Amino acid sequence: MASQIRVTKSKLIPFADRVLIERIEEKRGTIVMTDADKSLKGRVIAVGPGKKDEDGELISMEVKPGDLVYFNSRWHDLGDDYQQHQWWDDPNVHLVQQADILGKIT
């Protein structure tokens, strides 16, 4: 079995339109939101420069480090298989494309 590469969130620089997000467990009163919820809440750690359109023009990113966002994570949807695909040190850190971000929290 090949060994996995482990990366810490402070050493990962996203490319293109990728965004590194640290998940924040949301609590409402005494109820803790569970993994069954459709979207996740998190704080943006790092962003890539953006991706290029068909004409080669850079499409700028709509989020920046420090922003609070709601997002979907394809890896999160794997449930128990998530650990097999996690290659960074913190299970609350997600690498997603900008399109997976549902919106910023202001």
Image: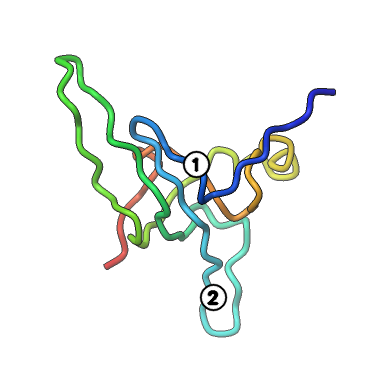
| Three-letter amino acid code of the residue under disc 2 | Lys
Tell me if residue 35 comes above or below residue 53 in the rendering: below
Badge 2 is on which residue? 27
Q: Nearer the viewer, residue 101 or 39?
A: 101
Q: Residue at x 37, y 58 (%)?
A: 69
Dot placed on the residue nearer the N-terminal end, 1 or 2: 1
- The percent position of residue 5, horizontal first and vertical second, equals 68, 33
Looking at this view, name the residue that lies furthest to the bottom: 29
Q: Which sits in the foreground, 82 or 11?
A: 11
Residue placed at 15% from the left, 23% from the top?
57
Note whether 29 is above or below 33 in the view shown.
Answer: below
Q: Is residue 41 left or right of residue 8?
A: left
Per the image, label 1 sits on a secondary structure element best described as: loop
Q: Crowding at label 2, few (<14), some or many (≥20) Cα neighbours within 10 Å?
A: few
Q: How is the image coloured?
A: rainbow
Report x, y in % for residue 62. 24, 46
Q: Residue at x 39, y 48 (%)?
A: 46
Is residue 103 depicted above or below 2 in this figure?
below
Give me the residue at 39% from left, 37% from top.
18
Residue that badge 1 annotates: 12
